[in-house]
Image (cartoon, rainbow, N blue to C red):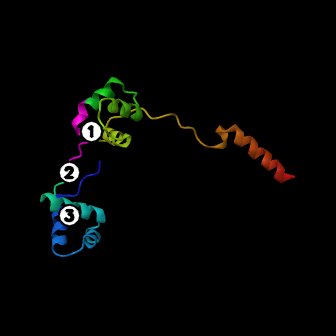
Amino acid sequence: MPQPYSQELRKRMITAVEAGNSRREVARSFNVSPGCVIKLMQQWEATGDCRPHQQKALAEHEAEVRALVVADPDISVTELWSAIKALGIKVSRATVGRFLQYLKLKTKKGRVRRRTTTANRPSLRRSRATSRQGKQQ
C-alpha cells in the first residue's frame, strides 16, 4: 500500500490554503493532486485533524486471511476473495490482492495464460499460409 503523505507536508499544505492560496495552487506548488488538497481541507474543516486515515478494510481481519491462506496455500486471489465474502467481510477483489502483497503472502496465479503467437493458434497459421500463397500468384 502506498505511504500517506507526512504530517509535516499536510500541515504545510493546510497553512498555505489558510494563507489565501487556492487549493489547486497549493496542489501545484507541493506537487500533489488537487483532490488530495481538497480532501485534506475537507477533513481539516470537519474534524480539525489532518492525520491520515487508517487503512482498515482487511487489517481487522488479518488473522482470518492468514488462516485461509495457510489452510490452502494454492488458493487463488479470486477463491480467497470468495472465502472472505463468505465470512461476511465486504471488500473488493483488488483489495484482497493488495492486502496479500502488504502481508507478503503468495497465492496461486489464475488460469494458465497462453501466448498469443500464431504457433499456438493453428487456425491463424493456416489462414496466414493461404494468404501468402495468394500473394505469390
Residue holding disc 3:
41
Separation of marks 3 and 1 at Cα, in angstroms? 27 Å
Q: Residue furthest right?
A: 137
Picture disc at residue 18 = none
Query: What residue appears at the point 29 percent right and 62 percent down from the top-left corner?
Result: 35
Camera-side residue: 135 or 52? 52
Separation of marks 2 and 3 at Cα, in angstroms? 14 Å
Q: Amino acid at mark 1?
A: Leu
The percent position of residue 89, horizontal first and vertical second, equals 29, 35
Q: Is residue 108 above or below residue 45?
A: above
Q: Amino acid at mark 3?
A: Met
**Of marks 3 and 1, the one in the foreground:** 3
Residue holding disc 2:
53
Q: Is residue 93 above or below residue 82?
A: below
Considering the numbered disc 2 on the image, is that residue within a helix, a strand or a loop?
Answer: loop
Picture disc at residue 58 = 1
Per the image, is 56 magenta? yes
Considering the numbered disc 3 on the image, is that residue within a helix, a strand or a loop?
Answer: helix
Camera-side residue: 40 or 30? 40
**Of marks 2 and 3, the one in the foreground:** 3
Q: Is residue 18 something one can see in this rendering? A: yes
Q: Amino acid at mark 2?
A: His
The percent position of residue 132, horizontal first and vertical second, equals 79, 49
Quadrant for residue 36, please give it: bottom left
Q: Residue furthest left?
A: 48
For this view, does 53 lie left or right of residue 84?
left
Q: Residue furthest bottom?
A: 20
- Report the span colored magenta: 53-63
Check if mark 3's residue and mark 1's residue have beta carbons within 8 Å.
no
